[in-house]
Amino acid sequence: MLFRSFALAVTRCSQSVIVLSDQDDVWLADKLARIAQVFEHDPHVSAVAGDLEIVAPKLQPTGRTQWQALGFDAAEQARLAGPSGFEVLLRRNVVTGAGFAFRTALRSQFEPIPGEYLHDEWIALIAAACGRLALIAEPTTLYRSHGAQQVGAGPTGVLQELAHARAKMGADRKSTRLNSSHLVISYAVFCLKK
């Protein structure tokens, strides 16, 4: 149901760039201007991903960002923003919808969104296969972390994060996702041939 609602919302967008928004997060004042600047500077950029400042439920700072929590370091960031972006995203998802924007023209390439992928994860894969991702290394959003979120930064300890990830991604989803790798690679080949 979530993916159908998301897909419907995206089809109704009429501007040249779509910026994803989670209902419980807070955009920093200059977020849209920074995203617009990236797209205006480079017409070959298909999507922009920004880091997120992780905050507690009442917006109290935690002292860490999403990319720090994921161990997404400068070297891997450079690979994602370069020609190896698709390969980076095939290995693991480091793009979070709350910090993500993409060109509206890309939507014809990523619809429909397969059920075994999170919408932001799928769109980022297709954006990297069909174009180039640009990164904004500084946080653009206050990303609320709490126990009720479906996907996210979750608890702060390593063991808690591992348990949180296992609970959120069951064995069935992992298996289905591995079996759908051919779909992702087919999309990449299709985009590269254009």
Image (cartoon, grey):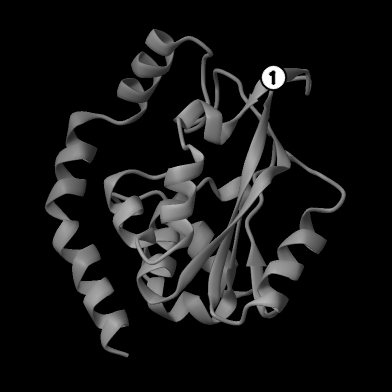
Q: Amino acid at mark 1?
A: Gly
Which picture quadrant has residue 169?
A: top left
Residue furthest to the right in view is 29
- Relative to 19, say whether 187 is above or below: below
| Residue 119 appears anywhere in the view | no
From the viewer's perspective, tell me whether residue 131 is left or right of residue 19. left
| Residue 194 appears anywhere in the view | yes
- Relative to 134, say whether 143 is above or below: above
- Relative to 84, say whether 97 is above or below: above
Which picture quadrant has residue 145?
A: top right
Q: Residues within 10 Å of mark 1 (few under 14, many from 20)?
A: few
From the viewer's perspective, tell me whether residue 120 is left or right of residue 63. left
Q: Which residue is mark 1?
A: 63
* Residue appearing at x 53%, y 13% in the figure: 156
Question: Residue 105 at x, y = what percent?
Answer: 53, 82
> Judging from the image, what secondary structure is the residue with disc 1 in?
strand
Residue furthest to the bottom in view is 194
Question: Residue 93 at x, y = what percent?
Answer: 39, 45
* Residue appearing at x 42%, y 17% in the figure: 161
- Relative to 36, say whether 73 is above or below: above
Question: Residue 43 at x, y = what percent?
Answer: 61, 82
